Amino acid sequence: MNASGFGNIILITGLLLIISGCYCLIRTYHLLKITIGIELAMKAVTMFITLAGYINGNIDLAQAFAITSIVIEVVVTVVAAGIAINLYRKYGSMDVRNLRKLKG
Amino acid sequence: MSAMAYIAVSFLVVPLIIIIINNLISRKAAGKVSLYMACACAVIQMASSVTDFFLLSAKHLHEYKFTLLWNMEEAGAEHFGVTSLSLVILFCIGFVSLISVLIAFKTIEHKKISYVNLLMTLILGMNGMVIVTDLFSLYVFLEIVGISSFVLIAMFQSETGLEGAFKYLVMSALASIFILTGLSFIFMYTGSLQYSQIGDILSVKDGSQQTLIYAAVILLISGFAVKTGSVPFHSWLPDAHQSADTAVSVLLSGIVIKVAGIYSFIVLTNLFSGVPAINLTLAIMGIVSIVTGALLALRQTHFKRIVAYSSVSQMGYILLGISTGSTLGLVGAVAHIFNHATFKSTLFANAAALHEQTGTLDINEMGGLQKKMPVTGFSNIAAFLSTAGIPPFAGFWSKLLIIMALWKNSMQVYAGIALFSSILTAAYFLRMQKKVFFGKVPAKYAELKEIGGSIKFAEIMLTIVIIGAGVCFPLALMYLKGRGIL
Amino acid sequence: METVIYICLGLMLIFGVMAVMLHSMTKSAIALAAASAALGIIMYEMGAVWTALIEISVCSGLVTVIFISAISLSNMDKKELEKVYEDKKRMSLLPVILIVSGVVLVIAAISAGVSLPEANQTVNTSGDLREILWNNRQADIWGQIIIMITGSAAVVVLFRERD
């Protein structure tokens, strides 16, 4: 395949991964699985950044972006897990259907 | 280094110093001193932004570039830069943080040290957002703002607080994914993401390569719209505002949704002025936000939820001002950012006062509090008259500028709908005022007294600012005309 | 080089779908770690050597440890998980959706003629990343320092048990 087709395949795979991550986010009932969905989508985005650097020729700048993005991803995961554990301590289960106090 | 360099660097250095001091001294001493230190940081930020504004205009510079501990002259190095627009927003950041600390003197009893830590990182994130000159650094500081605000909402571990924080986290993570995907699509075409280098590269692309650029712009607009809280991504905003402590709600509504959302839109429209239909999209989002926010506020019974939906509505006005693309619209939008910060802070300060004295925020349970809490009642009237755009309060001038900009740009339908929704704004606020402050006093509140201390001081100061800004606005307009902006 | 990348793309998709659809949370976290490893190999083949190293050590290692410690604080039996959350049934549409959207995207890409710019084969050697990161992108480094301070303040305030 030519170089352009190679990039297209990676693009399509990345979009499929983002779709599965968002689908997991929307349909699940378990608090920690929402975090796994967010993680999966951010991995696809890291792949997009590296692909952009590869096509551009400027792979080092893309590496700098990707490293910063990984740091942000870890901190978001830690905060989400922290809030999930606090909710578990309040309600006794990790079910999303418990969160019904705010309506309207 | 010159005076300007010291002042410009202080936006980043002062909060860092306060975080370090806050954590190094012993816990007991920090518990007493930390809120005063946060107050000092906010006042220093307000003073330095005003000083820098006049220094910048005296030297006739458009932008002042500076760096913090590294060399600016190397090839491809990025730098920080302050322009007049960013100095106005920095002043608003300092002002709203001051109000939040004044409210926090009364409402926060435990966890003061953590509150000050997180407030300092939030201020650092917002300062960083307005002074960087690179799209990826904008994203990094946007994430800092987001994470600080989730933890601030969830900090007090109430059930509603954790739920509101989790909903906000999920929607904000979706927004980050969209924004990063859009950024990587743009990065595929241009070699770097700095503001100065994107604009000239994007204009020379031909048709077959424009699909990805259009997709990138749509993704960026959706991501920033989630952060602004404009329709159809507004569902996190009322929940987050209602469930957070009032000192945090002031921050969220007064400055976070504006810096994280509206400032990013301003950057986006500056960079992508060659792509058509951005202005139309922003205008449609603005109009729908105004009407939806106003209609949904009419049926709420919780004080803070009414104020939150009012925020959604006012963000629509600012989006309309930006979407005209003209300087008049931009000036109107920035003026409305400042005015909205003042009257929204007043409303939340009143909410804190009501909650402290009566213990509830349900407007059906309150009534006739005008006799018992006169200062709160009067500042509430001033705030909602300013929101509805009634002269001589400050809100009238900024709405006038936005509607004039729309008229000049031949978007008369939008101007008409915006004018009509001022009536809706007055309607829902009048309903709230009538139920809370007029009417008969319920028996259980017979012993009620006015709120004292720092919240009363904040309310009085804000009322003076609202009336004073309304009276002095024509002077500001003449000053801008003298400098050639208008 | 290209065949390795295609194999790893396929592995990443399979592990990702497994992470979404499995019931047991620990197996889900391990599937996510395997997807990170596959991504690391892809990035190494494209020339981003340092990022592949950090991705495998941080995402495959650190984040998985965080997940498993959070999961073990809320342990539930596997049969109970299946009864309460019903993940396999709720997510069973996922492979169908993926195949359908994959076909749609391929057709859209061919018909719209989306063509990425030509790949530049002049990939720099790995010595330049450190210069770029520390000389050019200092604003990002300040951002990373601040975000780590925020993360530690968040952990202090969220995980404390005493009142």
Image (tube, rainbow, N blue to C red):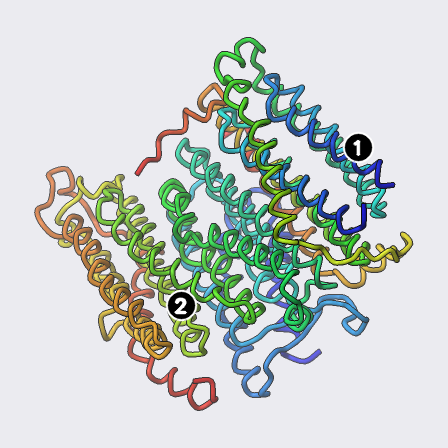
Q: Position of residue B13 (x, y in %)?
A: 64, 62
> For the residue labelled by badge 1, is the local secondary structure a helix, a strand or a loop?
helix
The residue closer to the viewer here, A16 or B418, is A16
Label 1 marks a residue whose chain is C
State the mark number for residue C7.
1
**Which residue occupies 66% across, 29% down?**
C16
The residue type indicated by label 1 comes to: Ile
Label 2 marks a residue whose chain is B
For the question of whether residue B458 can be seen, the reply is no
The residue type indicated by label 2 comes to: Phe
The residue closer to the viewer here, B485 or B161, is B485
Residues tagged 1 and 2 counted as in contact (Cβ below 8 A): no
Q: Quadrant of the C terminus of chain B?
A: bottom left
Q: Position of residue C39 (x, y in %)?
A: 76, 37
Q: Position of residue B159 (x, y in %)?
A: 41, 31
> For the residue labelled by badge 2, is the local secondary structure a helix, a strand or a loop?
helix
Q: Which residue is mark 2?
A: B338
For the question of whether residue B9 can be seen, the reply is yes
